[in-house]
Image (cartoon, helix red, strand yellow):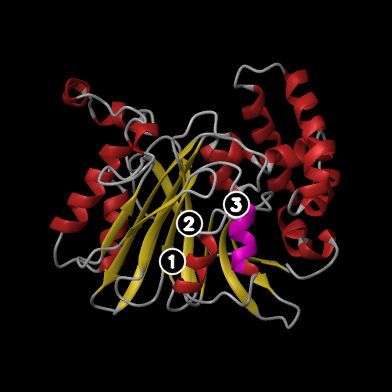
Amino acid sequence: MLSNVYKNIIKVEETRKVYFEEKSAEEVWRDVMAKDHSSMQALCTAMSKLVYEVGVPKWLVHMSANILYHTVYRWWGHFTHESDYLAHQFSGMSPSLMAFLQRQYTLAHMGCSVVMAWDEKDKQMLCFRSLDWKGSDDIAKSTRKFSFINRADEEVAQIAGITAMVGVLTGVKKGFSIAINYAPWKRSARFKSDPTFLIRKLLEDEGVNSYTEALQEVQSWETGSPCFISLCGVEKGEACVVELGHKGVVHVRYMDEGGLLIQTNHYDLQGSPFIHHNEAAYSEDEVAQMDEQQWYDSELLRNSQQRYKLLDSFMQETKDVPMPEKLVLAYKQVPVLNWETAQWVLMKPSMGELDVYACTDK
């Protein structure tokens, strides 16, 4: 356990196997279901409550989910047979509501912080990400390391997984890593694939094994909502953030010669065509008056630039500390660490491996 005043940060040791090439959803999820059924039920219940708490009447949530399921998800949705199977395993969960919950990255707001850096000592690229989402404690308790296994019983990718989630937020295979961050674009949902499904399909694709190949694929995506996709490769400088907008408009920000690239939850201030969508940052007067607890509890879209500045200055100024330890220390800073922090993930694309940490409330 990594000591912190706000969170219990616990390394996840157990790995679950996901047999992604099996035809039946029951076979795909057999290992996770056998070991984590109670966790999956608890998470589904908690996520349902979060949806009901946004102020929309419960009956309207179910009606909307039912209409979307029968008009869109059943016919064009990815992994619908898997979400249908999961729905039948848990009480109080209809196939339409389960499919609706699986698409919450398109429909919900959350924050995240990603740092991609060159480790000069070990001569490798590293990517460290924090997943910040409402219901963080429930997500942390349902956090597992997933190993995606093909029919030849070979590991194709490692995933920082959430037990009842069929999409992927964070993953790595030998050659590149990928992570998604929420982008501040209001009224942005479209009838396109949830980006977490596209990330899963990319990691499952055994024909895509390098940073260059992954970047080519990601730039062609049309997603259900705009988002930031962080890609990290093997060679020094192989890192970028892809800003996916609507109608195929894409902006890519590449790692500079300093071997450092950071992404939080705002568009590139130095050249993004989407900059007008950025949430207003806290004013100088507000920043001057806020103490650490207030920063910890602050709004993630409004503190995005503060998180960026903290990570950038710490990574630039801290010397003579091994890179993995340096990243951990950087992410312990508030509000990089905040009330919605659920996971930390350290990815090593040269080895196709990741370390997963669950960040539970104290």
* Amino acid type for the residue under numbered disc 3: Thr
Camera-nearest residue between 327 and 141: 327
Q: Is residue 211 visible?
A: yes
Q: What residue is pinned by disc 3? A: 196
Left-right relation of 283 to 209: left
Give coordinates of residue 75: x percent, y percent.
83, 47
Other-residue count near label 1 (Cα within 10 Å), few / some / many at <14 / 14–19 / ≥20: many
Cβ atoms under marks 2 and 1 closer than 8 Å: yes
Measure the C-alpha gap from mark 3 to mark 2. 9 Å
> In the rendered view, would you say 230 is above or below 292?
below
Quadrant of the image for the C terminus? top left
Q: What residue is pinned by disc 1? A: 347
Other-residue count near label 2 (Cα within 10 Å), few / some / many at <14 / 14–19 / ≥20: many
Q: Residue at x 35, y 70 (%)?
A: 238
* Amino acid type for the residue under numbered disc 1: Met
Q: Secondary structure at mark 3?
A: helix
Q: Secondary structure at mark 2?
A: strand
Give coordinates of residue 242: x percent, y percent.
43, 55
Q: Residue at x 59, y 50 (%)?
A: 222
Task: Name the N-terminal-most of marks 2 and 1.
Answer: 2
Cβ atoms under marks 3 and 1 closer than 8 Å: no
> In the rendered view, would you say 183 is above or below 281?
below
Quadrant of the image for the N terminus? bottom left
Task: Name the N-terminal-most of marks 3 and 1.
Answer: 3
Task: Name the N-terminal-most of marks 3 and 2.
Answer: 2
Q: Secondary structure at mark 1?
A: strand
